[in-house]
Image (cartoon, rainbow, N blue to C red):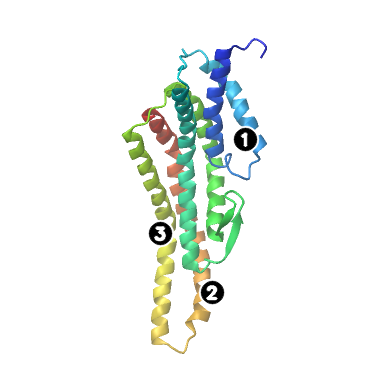
Amino acid sequence: MPYITTEQAEIFILILLRVSAMIITIPILGDRIVPFRIKAGLSLLITLLMFPSVQTAAWRLSADIISLVFRMAGEIMIGVMIGFIGRLIFDGIQLAGQLIGFQMGFSIVNVIDPVNNEQVSIIAQFQYLIAMLVFLIMNGHHIFLYSIAESFRIIPPLGFHFSGELIQVVVVFVKNMLEVAIKTGAPIIAVLLFTSVGMGLIARTVPQINIFIVGFPLQIAIGLISVGITLPVFFRVLGSYFSNLEGEIISLLRLM
């Protein structure tokens, strides 16, 4: 540290900006439940490890302060965009859980999500925890750590470029979030819908039955059974998305 030059200090700050933005936004490591000191320490550690390999590049920092600020914001944008891809998959899973819980009659049975610090459906929280375990088992966090190093090879510091193709890819990723919600929640939602239709027919044919007393526990039981039966499909869908995550991040980096 006593022999560090001004140029090396500027390089270190630029690397730290990109790494910190990525650590804060990626799934699990960037959750609110993870203490800020751990995020800051991990960002600093990764920056120190990356610094010797990145500083060999030719640096030409702009003398224009406004231009430099925009380019530094681009470094933050790179990290945010990479973490945004992983976040969309987990948001899609929670969306599916919210829809399933609503169909089961669990719309008011909410729990506090410590990750987002808000109330979510208990089914959504259950599926989120399962998805988090699958993500860790498949070493999904390694993909993001690898992406940090790969980002400096594909995009040199201060080399972020915004294009129309980048917006199109982001729109595709948002579409994929809705696909995750549909693929993971559609079977259970369909079963619960047919159950509601069946109870409606019973209420019309046998009006003596109090369908509200019978229907609520029946929907809850069928919903929980359906969640358990469709877990293999849930694992398969998550595995396919997590396995393609690395290629999607690389393609996004090349567009930036």
Residues at circles 1 and 2 in contact by the CB criterion of under 8 Å: no
Q: Residue lying farthest top? A: 3
Residue bearing the label numbered 3: 186
Tell which circle, 1 or 2, labels the residue nearer the N-terminal end. Answer: 1
Residue at the image point whose x is 38% and y is 80% from the top: 201
Distance from Cα at disc 3 to Cα at disc 2: 21 Å
Above or below — where is 101 with respect to 135? below
The crowding category of the residue bearing disc 2, from other C-alpha atoms within 10 Å (few below 14, some 14 to 19, many at least 20), is few
| Image depth: mark 3 or mark 1 in front | 1
Quarter residue 187 falls in: bottom left
Tell which circle, 3 or 2, labels the residue nearer the N-terminal end. Answer: 3
Percent x, y for residue 2? 67, 11
Quarter residue 8 falls in: top right
Q: Secondary structure at mark 2?
A: helix
Q: Secondary structure at mark 3?
A: helix
- Considering depth in this image, is 20 or 106 the residue closer to the camera? 20
Percent x, y for residue 19? 54, 29
The C terminus lies in which quarter of the figure? Answer: top left
Residue bearing the label numbered 2: 217
Residue bearing the label numbered 1: 39
Residues at circles 3 and 1 in contact by the CB criterion of under 8 Å: no
Amino acid residing under circle 2: Pro
Residue at the image point whose x is 62% and y is 51% from the top: 114
